[in-house]
Each structure stands twice: as C-alpha cells, then as structure tokens.
Image: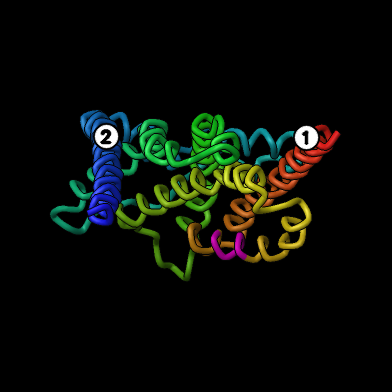
Amino acid sequence: MANEEGENKEEMGFMDHLEELRRRLFFALIGILSGSITLFVMKDWVFERLIFAPRNPDFITFRAWCALGEFTGAGDRLCVTDITYELINTTMLGNFSAHILVSAIGGFILSFPWTFNQIWRFIRPGLHGKEASAARGVTWAATVLFFLGVCFGYFVIAPLSLQFLGHYEIGDVKARIALMSYLKTVASITLAAGLIFQVPVVVHFLAKLGLVTPASLRKFRKHTLVVTLIIAAIITPPDLTSQVLVALPVLGLYEIGILQARRIQKRQEKAEQSANT
C-alpha cells in the first residue's frame, strides 16, 4: 500500500508539472497571438514603415552610411541613392501568406518579454539555492539583449544583405525578387540576431553554477569562432560581409561573457575565503 501511495504521489506530481507547463504555454500563446493580431490589423503601417523601409534610400541606416562616407573622406561612395530591385508576387495566396508570416514573427518579437516570462515562471520553481541565485534578473537581461539583437539585425545586417543580394548582377538579368524571399531574409536575420544576443545570459548562468570558468571559455574561444561563423553562414545571406557583421558582435558578447565569468569566479573565491576564516 505504501508503494502504491508513493507511486500515486509521483504520478500526481508529474501531472501537476504537465498541467503547469500547458498553462504557461497557453498564456505565452495568448501573448503571441495578441501581438500578431495587433500587427495584422496595422498592415499598412507595418509593411510601409517597417518591412519595406530598408528598400527606401532615405532609410536611417543608409543615411548613416552616407554620413560615415563623408566623415571618412570616401565621399558619396557609401551613399545609397537608388534601389533598383523589384518585389513581385506570383501566387494567389502570396500576399496573404506574407501578411500572416510577418504578423506571426512580429507577434513573437513584440511579445518576447511576456513569452519569456511565462517560460521562466515554469522553470523558476524547480531551481534551488545556487541555481535560483544564478538566475536572478534573467528576464530583464534576456529582454534587453533580445531587443538589442533585433535592432542590430534590422538596422545593420538586413539592409546590407538586401543591398548586396538585391543588386548582385549577372549579365543583363534584372533582379525581380519574390516577396516571400525578401520577407524570409529580413525576418530570419532580425529574429536570429535577437536570439544570438542571449549569449551573455547563458554564460552568466553557467558561470554562476560553476559549469564554466574563464579558463574553459578562453580554451574554447577558437571553437566558438568556428561555430559562430557556421551559424552566421546559416542565418545570413551567402555574402562574407553579412557573416562577419553577425560574427563580430557574437564574439564580442562571448568576450564579455569571459569577463563576466572571471568576475563571478573572483566573488566566489572571496566568499569561500570568508567562509573558511
């Protein structure tokens, strides 16, 4: 009888966790749907002011490039004065599918703080002592880094990639790009950059738990470089400049993670010395 009661308690515990996961995922989905519906209704503003903005020579990034060219003495070589590639739709559902895709991805980006918080509220009760202390403030840090990454992808990597690929010429073949191809390029770069910027959060958490040290992070620096370049090649269009632009901030964030881990290690060593004395 005692064994049966123990098994029932374990089964009830598992079912309770499963129910809590279902509830958190439901709330997260509600947040994503709310963001998606909002962006779906704001179709004209979203497409004209956000999605198609990198096709406008007056886009803030292009104006910054032009100012940089004048400052460095390059003249108007960095200025974007004309965007010649065209966007086309060749299917009946093309425009509607594009609208759905933009709304879904935009809804996830818009609701990221809420979605991450729901997932975190499911994970947090399972953390104890050192783990809970290591994860303090993770929601705010993850949110800030995510939106920094999104901005970096949208304002830096995406415009450069679109300019390179949209104006890459072979003979007299004119660039007429499918709408979905354009959207997937912008969306994949923007979203992936936001997720990649979570590196310091992961390193901080692992360092707090003692799973990584500054020495181990430095040891695997070369491996990180190779993996970063591979990831950059996957999430960006096949041009070297875009890959480098993705890789550089990731490597910079990795170095910040090493400094973070070193600081955490010193604090832990001081705490141990104080406890021994």
Q: Which residue is mark 2?
A: 27
**Can you say which quadrant of the picture contains the C terminus?**
top right
Q: Which residue is mark 1?
A: 271
Q: Observer-nearest residue: 180 or 193? A: 193
Tell me the amino acid under the disc marked 2.
Phe
230 part of magenta stretch: yes
- Looking at this rendering, what residue extends furthest in the left direction? 92
Q: Please, what is the dominant secondary structure of the magenta stretch?
A: helix
Region rendered in magenta: 227-231
Q: Measured from the top left, where is residue 170 in percent x and y?
A: 47, 69
Q: Observer-nearest residue: 262 or 60? A: 262
Q: Measured from the top left, where is residue 56 in percent x and y?
A: 44, 38
Q: CA distance from mark 2 to mark 1?
A: 40 Å
SS assignment at label 1: helix
Q: Measured from the top left, where is residue 245 in percent x and y?
A: 62, 51
**Neighbour tally class for label 1: few under 14, some 14-19, many 20 plus, Cα within 10 Å:** few
Residue 174 appears left or right of 260: left
